[in-house]
Image (cartoon, grey):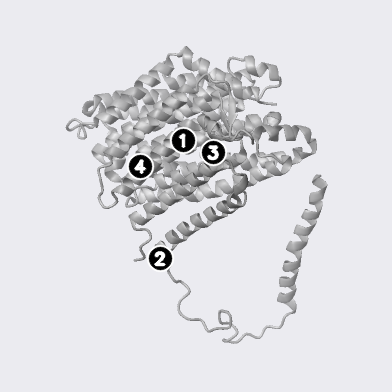
Amino acid sequence: MGDIGFGSLGGILPELIIVLGGLLILVLDIAQADRQDSGRGYLAVSVLFLIVGLTGVLLQIGMEPYIVLSTTAIDPFATYLKLVIYTGMILVAIGGGSYMNRHATGRGEFWALFLFVTAAMSFAVSATNLLLLYLSIEFLSITSYILAGFLRTNKRSAEAGLKYFLYGSVAAAVMLYGMSLLYGATGSLDLGEIAQGLAANAEMAAIIPAATLLTLVGLGFKASLAPFYQWAPDVYDGAPTPITAYLSTASKAVGFAVMARVFVVALGAYRVEWAPILAGLSVLTMTVGNVIALRQTSVKRMLAYSSVAQAGYILMGLTAVVSSQQADLTVLGMNGLNGLLLYLFAYLFTNIGAFLVVLAVEDETGSTELDAYSNLVQRAPGMAWAMFIFLLSLAGIPLTGGFVGKFYVFGAAVQHQYFWLAGVGLVNAAIAAYYYLNVVRTMFFASDGEAATGRMAAPVAIQSVVLLCVLATIWIGLYPPRLLEWANSASRQLLALML
Amino acid sequence: MLQNYTFVLILSGLALLVPVAAIVLGHFLGPRRPNPIKNQTYESGVETVGDTWVQFRAQYYLIGLIFLIFDVEVIFLFPIALAYQRLSLFGVVATITFVVILLLGLLLEWRKGALEWE
């Protein structure tokens, strides 16, 4: 514990900047409590601080991995995910900020919470200590409950907040029990020391299945995996659309990142045991998500179920980490984990873009139903074509980001002899293409022309963020070598920690 | 080491068995002669007043939460006060930051009117 001092704060500087930004907004809000302002200033301050935080994270790229304050790892894996998180939050803030400013009552509180939730996610992906891990996940959860129910006068939003809270508190309690079993078995909260303790004490093996399953409940809840996904559709559907955009991307990425770190670093020695469980969950998640998504008439709710299904594909990457020989893991081109990381990055731009199009349509027509999208190509050609590309990417068509992600997780599954898993995944991808393309059909070829009256004017902020998301989706689809190398180094570094 | 948990298991079994046995035996062996006075809700020997479904103000929970936060803060401050002589400058600054952030929260609640009882 001797390394605690002012110098060690340098490692968590991006997070500190974000927290300071949140506090600054709180102070600004205190300074003018009697008047409701437009919230534009808060939006600008938030984006500014997020960009400064992102710059801080960019400066940490390529650093040798090290641990600050004995609990936080500054390593390529964490840096990669922080980049995903900060990028996502900036996109959401710019694209969805003015919507929240128009509809929310406490604007200062909203933007302060928005920055705090970013800091919480940022801490969660680099935590190497069960205590900090739990604290940051709880921090993330509690702020997310409030944000999901932020539009208090809107019944759906309040319902989303309450449902998220009820499910989340149970999941957190169960996860805490699993963590306490791990601590009881090894006497340490540090993930690396837990792995060593388990290796040194073979008779503790009896407690591992229980501890693993219980921890999986809490982390699977965050990532919306199948038996713990029930909250996801209602919350994604009911929450304000900008909040849904980050809950289904950045927050989900955190769930997967923490799961990967706990399972690979602390429970790596038992990967032969947990991989089949994850494979089962993966199949269940993608099938349930896709089958229910088929029957949805609301595009927002369809995207919510599709987000559950995508979690199943992403989990395939973590399943494929299992291998008989340690040496193989680091040399393989597809180690599963890099597929997971690439998928998360591509999915971020695609899904945020798709939800922003939903937001623009919702703003114009007041509806998220499929009918509101009929002949969208005549009313807003840009939005329709952008949505087309996002849906192609979600379906995994080549030359889009979604294809690269799917290619890497399916490839990893095949390479590690999980043929049945890849097979089920392919069937699911085919089912998913049906309901994604159904939206495309409605947008481009709807027969009734009555809805096609007048042009739809989307705000410039949404248009520019959607354009950015389209460009990023296509850019990732073109196999950028820099991104691949980056995901590779991040995954190799984490896998090297596996005992 | 896992064998130590055998006793926990035995004790949990006993803990479950004894009350169940008491309730079941009481059910079969005890005499039962109910009358209206016996059937009244027991409230520390005092006669029941009013309805049980009293509504609490939502504000009560708000004040309760604020109290809880500062209660926990005090618990954190005790060990710091105890080890104050051996604290480094970093520790002092960290403590002050912790308290200042919570004070900021209190200020926010005050300004937003959460402390006014309406």
- For the residues marked 1 and 4, what is the alpha-carbon distance in whole angstroms? 14 Å
Which quarter shows the C terminus of chain A?
top right
- Check the residue under mark 3 and report the chain it is in: A
**Which amino acid does the dot numbered 1 rest on?**
Leu
Of marks 2 and 3, the one in the foreground: 2
- For the residues marked 4 and 2, what is the alpha-carbon distance in whole angstroms? 30 Å
Q: Is residue A464 left or right of residue A269?
A: left
Disc ID at residue A16: 1
Of marks 2 and 1, the one in the foreground: 1
For mark 2, give the secondary structure: loop
Disc ID at residue A25: 4
For mark 4, give the secondary structure: helix
Residues indicated by labels 3 and 4 sit on the same polypeptide chain: yes
Closer to the chain start, of discs 1 and 4, is 1
Closer to the chain start, of discs 1 and 3, is 1
Q: Is residue A287 left or right of residue A196?
A: left
Is residue A316 positioned above or below A43 on the image?
above
Q: Which residue is mark 3?
A: A226
For mark 1, give the secondary structure: helix
Specify the quadrant of the image occupied by residue A443: top left
Is residue A83 positioned above or below A129 on the image?
above
Depth check, front residue: A197 or A361: A197
Q: Is residue B97 left or right of residue A151?
A: right
- Check the residue under mark 4 and report the chain it is in: A
- For the residues marked 1 and 3, what is the alpha-carbon distance in whole angstroms? 35 Å
**Which amino acid does the dot numbered 3 rest on?**
Ala
Q: Which residue is mark 2?
A: B57
Q: Give the farthest residue toward the left.
A: A454
